[in-house]
Image: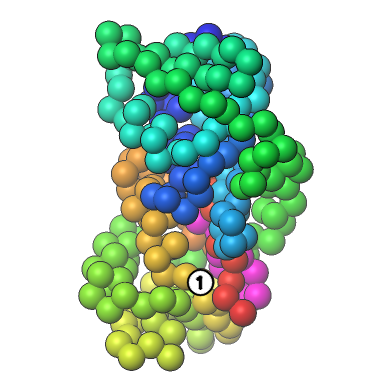
Amino acid sequence: METASSKAMCDILKKIHLQGTIGECLLVVKKGDGKVLATDMSNTVFAVSSESLAPSGDAELGLPNLATLTRFLDGATDDVSLAIKEQWLTISKKKHGSLKFLMLESKQVPTAIMDEDADKKILKAKGTLIPFSKGVREDFAFYMGLVASKAVVFRVKDGKAYLQSASSEPEQFKLTLGATEAGDFQVSVYGDLLLKVLTTVDGLGLTESLQIYIGDNAPLFAYIDDDNFWALSPIQ
């Protein structure tokens, strides 16, 4: 793989980085298709990201400092050229210079999930699809800026789903999501992490594709497709 789409490479890394949540990753490229399976250092989010990067080529890249890489690639319109020498990777933008950095060995990437089937296994825990409109996303972002709830609760009661602050919060919000076929239960996740997922999705223009799945004592899935999703661990 000598060249890659700068936009696709930036997008795949932004979905993993989540605005600073995951700092590095292992990017595996097979026949030009790139994929990352990663988790943050606290195992709070399981992230899967995939993009078609190049017409062909195989590579395994231990990428450090995703903040630097995404900033370098963001907004580039042309393909970038990639050159690997020993453990050094040089990414060049046409007429705009290059960035060179020392890659990590695959086993040195602390966020990497080495089980290639881990995404398929965790998808078996995907629960029930619940309503989560663009308006709800916008209201949630507003309330998170207003009351800054640490934990947020998805609650299903009497055939309706709600999103609200945890009962322990000194200031609380509540949003009605809509009707659902799920039975009564509730699941809590970290509100700031969910907000990072939603704002990343919005920034990549994927808002209309995003679906939210919840289950009793199961991860919350922010789901685009089987190769692009986030599984947020419930707060016990």
Question: Where residue 90 sits in the image (x, y, percent)?
Answer: 47, 16
Please report the residue visible at 44 percent of the width from the left and 84 percent of the height from the top: 166
The one of 75 and 99 positioned closer to us in this rendering:
99
User: Would you place residue 45 above or below residue 74 in this image?
Assistant: below
Q: Residues within 10 Å of mark 1 (few under 14, many from 20)?
A: many
Please give left or right for residue 157 compared with residue 31 in the image: left
Image quadrant occupied by the N terminus:
top right
Question: Where residue 3 sits in the image (x, y, percent)?
Answer: 48, 11
Image quadrant occupied by the C terminus:
bottom right
The one of 211 and 153 positioned closer to us in this rendering:
153
Question: Where residue 32 sits in the image (x, y, percent)?
Answer: 58, 18
Magenta-colored stretch includes residue 216: yes
The one of 88 and 215 positioned closer to us in this rendering:
88
User: Would you place residue 103 above or below residue 138 in this image?
Assistant: above
Question: Where residue 208 sits in the image (x, y, percent)?
Answer: 37, 47
Residue occupied by mark 1:
189
Say what secondary structure mark 1 lies in: strand
Please report the residue visible at 57 percent of the width from the left and 54 percent of the height from the top: 40
Please report the residue visible at 33 percent of the width from the left and 91 percent of the height from the top: 170
Please give left or right for residue 33 compared with residue 82 in the image: right
Q: Which residues are magenta?
A: 214-223
Please report the residue visible at 69 percent of the width from the left and 45 percent of the height from the top: 113
The one of 44 and 200 positioned closer to us in this rendering:
44
Asked whether the viewer can see residue 223, the reply is no
Q: Given the image, on which type of amino acid does mark 1 rest?
A: Val
Magenta-colored stretch includes residue 141: no
